[in-house]
Amino acid sequence: MLEQLLAGSLEDARARRELAPIETVEAEALTRAPALDVLEALAPTDHIRVIAEVKRASPSRGDLAEIAEPQALAAKYEAGGASVVSVLTEERKFKGSLADLESVRKAVSIPVLRKDFIGDEYQILEARAAGADLVLLIVAALPQDRLVQLHDFARELGMTPLVEAHSADEVARAVDLGSQLIGVNARDLRTFELDRDLFGRVADQIPAGVIRVAESAVLDVADVEHYRAAGADAVLVGEALVTNDPIATLKSYLSV
């Protein structure tokens, strides 16, 4: 499944590149105001940080929510205390778009993440041109040399890569990059199986000073407490926020 998702995202990016050459997108990216300081926004504090996701659907859960105005949802996230807004831009299975990201960027003052299956510099330029401050890089989707190239390219643009791992070996690869923001996804993107305890098993491999993000399997406050006790500085949450009152749900999480 992961290979299919990456291949589809790259195919869609090639189609967009036919309409907007890389030189055009690069020029747009370079005229953007500097990316916001993501590490400051997610810096460890006395409560959990939340990356709140605009998410319509997923391959594992199908349709989750009708989100006609992603900017309005993102504004609620900010009002509820989210530190970062994540916007799924993958079109085929998650029903997102770069237009969603652009509208969210205009609506909030906090950092915005482009959540997609990134495998090409063009996609990172698109993200910056649309106003993203950080991009997701999935270790399992990329050989190490390519991961290094994309990580460095994002940083050259002033962006912060969120490097996502799904195993101890992948955490080690993320650490080797010198990443300052590492996510551990409880959902294996190859099988879509969930393992909420994975974060706790690998968190100690992430060096002090690196921000640790727990991703997936967050539905209620007990899940947030579980991750916080295991050492998470932040959680990334989508489904629970789009299927419940986002402000009330966020405030319950931020009590942890």
Image (cartoon, rainbow, N blue to C red):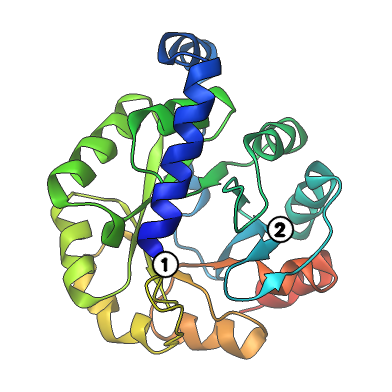
- At which x and y percent is residue 256? 61, 79
Q: Which mark is residue 81?
A: 2
- Horizontally, residue 12 falls left or right of residue 158, namely right
Q: What amino acid type is highlighted by mark number 1?
A: Met
Q: Are marks 2 and 1 in contact (CB under 8 Å)?
A: no
Question: Against 206, is 9 above or below?
Answer: above
Front-most of residues 167 and 231 = 167
Residue under label 1, please give it: 1
**The residue tagged with tag 2: helix, strand or loop?**
loop
Residue 159 screen position, x and y as percent:
41, 34
Residue 205 seen by the camera: yes
In the picture, residue 55 is in which quadrant?
bottom right
**Which class describes the residues within 10 Å of circle 1: few (<14), some (14-19), or many (20+)?**
few
Disc 2 to disc 1, C-alpha distance: 33 Å
> Which disc is residue 30 wearing?
none
Is the residue 164 above or below the residue 145 in the image? below
Residue 199's x, y, as percent? 36, 80
Near-viewer residue (20 or 228): 20
Q: What secondary structure is found at the residue carrying circle 1?
A: loop
Give left or right: position of 200 versus 32. Answer: left
Vertical comparison of 150 with 201: above or below: above
Q: Quadrant of the N terminus?
A: bottom left
The percent position of residue 10, horizontal first and vertical second, equals 42, 40
Residue at x 49%, y 49% (from the top left corner) = 116
Residue shown at 46% from the left, 85% from the top: 194
Q: Could you say which quadrant of the image residue 230 lies in?
A: bottom left
Amino acid type indicated by mark 2: Gly
140 to the left or right of 212: left
Count the numbered circles shown.
2
Q: Work out whether 117 lies above or below 246.
A: above
- Tag 2: Cα neighbours inside 10 Å, few (<14), some, or many (≥20)? some
